[in-house]
Image: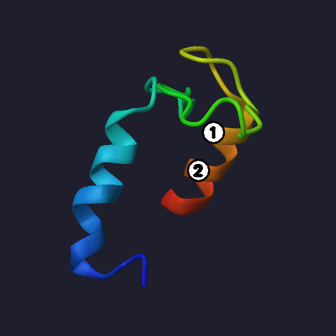
Amino acid sequence: MINHPNCQEALALLQSKGDGQLNYSAEKIFMKSSWVCFDPLRAKGDWITDEIQWLLM
């Protein structure tokens, strides 16, 4: 499903958000009062990096 043509724009967006070394960071935290933040904002995040790298493989 991830190789479907409709996913290509989303995959390109994910790739553009990296730091060039396959590291990613959270840009926003939604519903902070009821959401567990796994990574700090605007700093390399291990959790989000792992999730995005999995999608891009």
Percent across and percent down for residue 36 are 77, 37
Q: Are marks 2 and 1 in contact (CB under 8 Å)?
A: yes
Q: Is residue 41 above or below residue 52?
A: above
> What numbered label is drawn on residue 49?
1
Quadrant in the picture for the C terminus:
bottom right
Q: Residue at left 26%, top 65%? A: 8
Q: Residue at left 30%, top 46%? A: 13
Dot 2: element: helix
The amino acid pointed to by label 2 is: Gln
Compare residues 54 and 32 and report the one nearer the observer: 32
Quadrant in the picture for the N terminus:
bottom left
Using the rendered image of the protein, determine whether residue 30 is visible from the camera's viewpoint: yes
Query: Crowding at label 1, few (<14), some or many (≥20) Cα neighbours within 10 Å?
Result: some
Q: CA distance from mark 2 to mark 1?
A: 6 Å
Position of 51 with respect to 9 (left or right) is right
Residue corresponding to mark 2: 53
The amino acid pointed to by label 1 is: Thr
Q: Is residue 22 above or below residue 52?
A: above
Compare residues 9 and 28 and report the one nearer the observer: 28
Percent across and percent down for residue 21 are 52, 27
Percent across and percent down for residue 3 are 36, 78
Q: Is residue 44 above or below residue 16?
A: above
Quadrant assignment, res 44: top right
Q: Residue at left 32%, top 36%? A: 16
Compare residues 17 and 30 and report the one nearer the observer: 30
Query: Crowding at label 2, few (<14), some or many (≥20) Cα neighbours within 10 Å?
Result: some
